[in-house]
Image (spheres, helix red, strand yellow):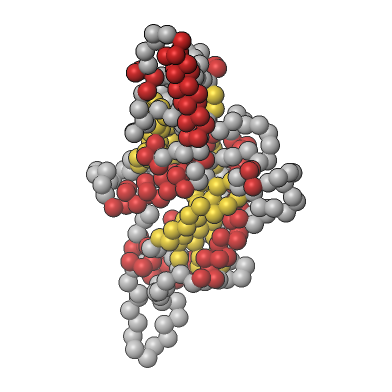
Amino acid sequence: MPPSTLFSPSELSYLHTSLSLNPPIRPDARSPTTFRPLVAETDLLPTTNGSARLCFADGSEAIVGVKAEVERTVGASNTSNNVRFHDDEDTKMHSAEEDMDEERGRQARGKGQDSWIEVTIDMPGFGRDDDGVVVFLAQMLQEGLVVDGGLRDRLWIGWRWHWKIYVDVYPLPLLSLTTHLALLATKLPAPISRIDEDPLFNDDWDAAEPLYPSSGSEQTSKPPFTLLVISVGDNIFFDPSREELAVADAVCAVTVGTVDATVFTGKRREGTPKLRLLSLRTIDPPARLAAAASTIEGEDDQGAWRPARGGMKRGTVGKMVKMVLEVGGVGEEVMTGLEGFYDG
């Protein structure tokens, strides 16, 4: 996020005034809920299980790669390795243990762990992985992926084994939307072993199963995504540009996911929201770091830059969330647009 000191106090004041108007005037003439034009592609990295790339018209881009590997679940024991066969009684005991393994497998479904998902972000200009900005962005992105619950549960293979995925993001712009596309494009080898056996997979990549199957139903689960939203005065803006971030009164990252289909007993009722709020983080806007323009006492200070102070109002937060989650709102538009980029 660029510092606001790149702009003069007069430029900052002009931008803030323009964005505070009703209706507001954005530097690139977009409406408050319109996103900048994007170019997207998937499956561009050959050594990954899934990948995606989003690019702005100005050439800035984000690339995400998803890799998966099989790991043994911590705390799981391999009881089948201790089975001996001597007579019919031992055979019955072995059969009972197999039934127990299968029952444990059924019970383990839906109990994925947060540690099965790992997110790393590579940002130019930040040489250390433990830099505060890098850690914050990685945690913000991972938070949405684990809170949703749907992704980690899909990584469960059996009660002794699971998939672990590594999400690598480079560089910063649109990191969440690119991750959403990459997860949609991710495929995992099809298993050919039983739940209680050590995992074996089909070598044919054409038989690989998508991490998020596309069934054409509106209730199909989708990866979560995060939208960056700002407020200037009483106006709310989505996909802010560098200039708009420099004068934002408040910045918020809203993470949403699809509504779990199991909450519906029948067909989804008309007017029912398709998205649910997973997390919300406020971000200190760059304007807080800018000093106010000095004025001569007794003179008119009209046009002088006065950055906002204090926290974000509850009403502003509620308005942001409502615009994202409501039926036909920004969240649904973004979801539909991303589905258009990836045809499965």
Question: Residue lying farthest top?
Answer: 86
Where residue 331 sits: x, y (%)?
A: 59, 51
- Is residue 176 in view? no
Residue at 40% of width from left, 42% of height from top?
Answer: 114
Name the residue located 34 percent from the left edge and 18 percent from the top edge.
82
Quadrant assignment for the C terminus: top right
Q: Is residue 244 above or below residue 157?
A: below
Residue 77, x across and y down, in percent: 35, 27
> Most extreme residue toward the bottom, as rendered?
298
- Label count reads 0
- The one nearer the camera, 261 or 291, is 261
- In this orientation, which residue lies closer to the viewer: 324 or 272? 272
Q: Quadrant of residue 303?
A: bottom left
Q: Quick check: can you spot residue 292?
A: yes
Task: Give the residue at x 33% y 43%.
Answer: 123
Q: Position of residue 300 (x, y in %)?
A: 42, 86
**Residue 51 vertical position relative to residue 269 in the rendered view, above or below:** above
The image shows residue 339, relative to residue 310, as above or below, that is above
Q: Nearer the viewer, residue 157 or 97?
A: 97
As displayed, is residue 36 above or below residue 92?
Answer: below
**Rendered location of residue 180, percent (x, y):** 51, 40
Report the quarter where the N terminus lies.
bottom left
Residue at image coords 36%, 68%: 288
Q: Nearer the viewer, residue 151 or 19?
A: 151
Q: Is residue 221 left or right of residue 66?
A: right
